[in-house]
Image (cartoon, rainbow, N blue to C red):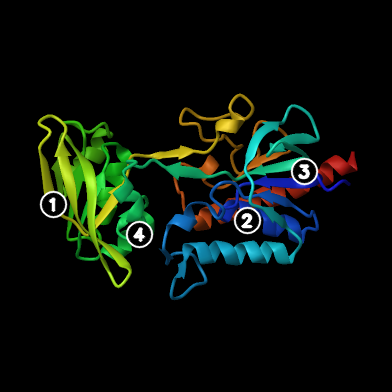
């Protein structure tokens, strides 16, 4: 088998992709992993991860991914920091294009993840992981008795705001319109929560913060009223983006079945896509849980699904 022809190619390198690599490597399938533009996935933009089993005192996101990567490499997985630009799943071996080079695979695990939609302002990027977050269930715990803001107006924003009231002393939702688009039940839950208040018709113009001995902390926000243009500075200890996620599925359009939000569809109880031999794991096929541990779990499932698929093909 030529070096560019593999039994398994894994696209993506978050907890799902690297766990799939670990399992397929241990099954002696010598997987090739294309890590993409964000090696390690979304965990590389978080700082501390406290809810991944096995780390009593927590672990830094990039460090966790590095450990899983090394674990997979120990069993023979090959990882490459390159991005897949094109795929052809119309016949086997599947064809994958990377930097103008062609690779062929008998089976493929798609673990390209999802990206949190962000505001796109520079101060948001600067404080990401230092008070700015895109995941309340991951980071809410760090904001005990603090004042936090949530940006958004859909169900995600309502869920995150509600969840954050378990820790924060005060939660303020900032929404660019004068009414939410969230479902009625979710809105009611938030509006009846004494810890939650809302700033309507407004956007976050800037994240304010300070540096102390190289450590960054969020101290406030500059809010802008979209109707009057007036800006106000408010005190804030944290800011949560809840304007949704975008699955990284662009290169699979018209090839793999997706739902209306462009997440990959898999068969219930498995990681099988509509193309036999192509499996999907992690946030690329999960808009609901979106946790490192669930992504790792589906990465394991995809590896076992791929292994069994290859065995069945070889038995023919």
Give the residue at mark 4: 139
Are the residues tagged 2 and 1 within 8 Å (C-beta)? no
Q: Tell which circle, 3 or 1, labels the residue nearer the N-terminal end.
A: 1
CA separation in Å, label 4 and label 3: 38 Å
CA separation in Å, label 3 and label 1: 56 Å
Q: Residue at x 29, y 43 (%)?
A: 157
Give the residue at mark 2: 18
For the image shown, how many numbered marks are present on the structure?
4
CA separation in Å, label 1 and label 4: 21 Å
Between disc 2 and disc 1, the foreground one is: 1
The residue carrying pointer 1 sits among few (fewer than 14), some (14 to 19) or many (20 or more) residues within 10 Å by Cα, namely few
Q: Is residue 283 above or below residue 213?
A: above
Give the residue at mark 1: 234
Q: Residue at x 59, y 50 (%)?
A: 298
Q: Tell which circle, 1 or 4, labels the residue nearer the N-terminal end.
A: 4
Q: Tell which circle, 4 or 3, labels the residue nearer the N-terminal end.
A: 4
Q: Residue furthest top?
A: 254
Q: Tell which circle, 3 or 2, labels the residue nearer the N-terminal end.
A: 2
Q: Position of residue 197 (x, y in %)?
A: 14, 47
């Amino acid at each position: 088998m030529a070096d560019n022809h593999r039994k398994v190619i894994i696209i993506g390198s978050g907890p799902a992709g690297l766990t799939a690599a670990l399992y397929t490597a241990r099954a002696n399938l010598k997987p090739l992993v294309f890590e993409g533009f964000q090696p390690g996935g979304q965990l590389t933009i978080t700082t501390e991860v406290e809810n991944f089993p096995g780390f009593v005192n927590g672990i830094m996101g990039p460090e966790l991914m590095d450990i899983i990567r090394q674990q997979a490499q120990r069993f023979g997985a090959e990882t490459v920091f390159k991005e897949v630009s094109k795929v052809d799943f119309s016949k086997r071996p599947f064809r994958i294009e990377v930097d103008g080079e062609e690779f062929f695979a008998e089976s493929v695990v798609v673990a390209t993840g999802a990206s949190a939609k962000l505001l796109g302002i520079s101060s948001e990027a600067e404080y990401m992981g230092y008070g700015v977050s895109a995941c309340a269930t991951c980071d809410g715990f760090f904001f005990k008795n603090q004042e936090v803001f949530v940006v958004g107006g859909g169900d995600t924003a309502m869920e995150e705001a509600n969840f954050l009231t378990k820790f924060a002393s005060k939660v303020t939702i900032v929404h660019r319109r004068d009414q939410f688009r969230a479902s009625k039940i979710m809105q009611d839950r938030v509006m009846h929560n004494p810890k939650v208040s809302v700033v309507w018709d407004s956007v976050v113009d800037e994240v304010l913060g300070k540096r102390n001995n190289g450590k960054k902390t969020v101290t406030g926000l500059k809010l802008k009223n979209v109707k009057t243009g007036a800006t106000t500075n408010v005190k804030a200890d944290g800011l949560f983006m809840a304007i949704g996620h975008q699955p990284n599925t662009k290169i699979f359009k018209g090839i793999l079945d997706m739902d209306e939000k462009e997440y990959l569809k898999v068969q219930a109880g498995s990681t099988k896509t509509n193309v036999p031999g192509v499996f999907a794991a992690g946030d690329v096929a999960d808009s609901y849980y979106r946790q490192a541990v669930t992504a790792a779990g589906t990465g394991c499932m995809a590896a076992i699904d791929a292994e069994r698929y290859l065995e069945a093909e070889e038995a023919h």
